[in-house]
Image (cartoon, helix red, strand yellow):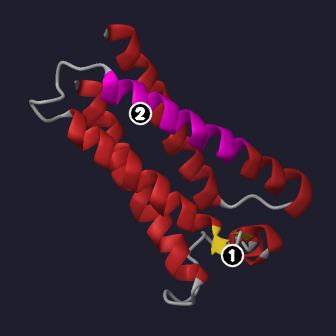
Amino acid sequence: MRHRQIVAALALTGLLLSIYLTLYHYGLTGQLACGGAASCEKVQASRYAVLLGLPVAGYGVGGYLVLLVVALAGLQDRWAASAGPTRLLVLLSAGGVAFTIYLTWLELFRIHAICRWCVGSAAIIVLAFVASLAGMRRS
């Protein structure tokens, strides 16, 4: 049950980060806060920042929102003893890790810039995956 709380907290953090980057993409936040490095803006302005007409950060919003809902649902009494939510968290976060690996490859070998916000999101999804796996081992 604790792993679901951890995943919920991580998903909420990732959701807020993704919302920030999505708002930036649409020009609603002003300049991107990235510690003085232009790498974040280079990544966000690249042709790879949009996938199938949506900003990549928008997929993060959707993915983290689904993780958050599943983790919170898994904390309810009805699902507390069930392994189903944990299995779903493992699958969802594994998909997120796979997508993150692809995006990191793009940053390294196509864009030639690393966005600190993207690294933060990558850390969040990997930690969510590890927490979900730990929950699977316990159940």
The quadrant holding residue 21 is: bottom right
Residue 74: x %, y % from top left: 23, 34
Name the dominant secondary structure of the magenta segment.
helix
In the displayed structure, 120 sits above or below 97; it is below
Circle 2 residue:
89
Q: Residue at x 34, y 53 (%)?
A: 12
Percent x, y of residue 31: 58, 86
- For the record, the magenta segment spans 84-101
* Residue 53: mark: 1
- Dot label at residue 88: none
Q: Amino acid at mark 2?
A: Leu
Residue 16 highlighted magenta (yes or no): no
**Which of 60 and 33 lies nearest the eye of the viewer?**
60
Find the residue positioned furthest to the left: 77
Quadrant of the rendering where the N terminus is positioned = top left
- How far across and how far down the image is residue 2, in percent? 24, 26
Relative placement, left or right, of 106 versus 25 is right
Q: Residue at x 67, y 46 (%)?
A: 99
The residue at the far right in this view is 109
Question: Is residue 131 rendered to the left or right of residue 116?
Answer: left
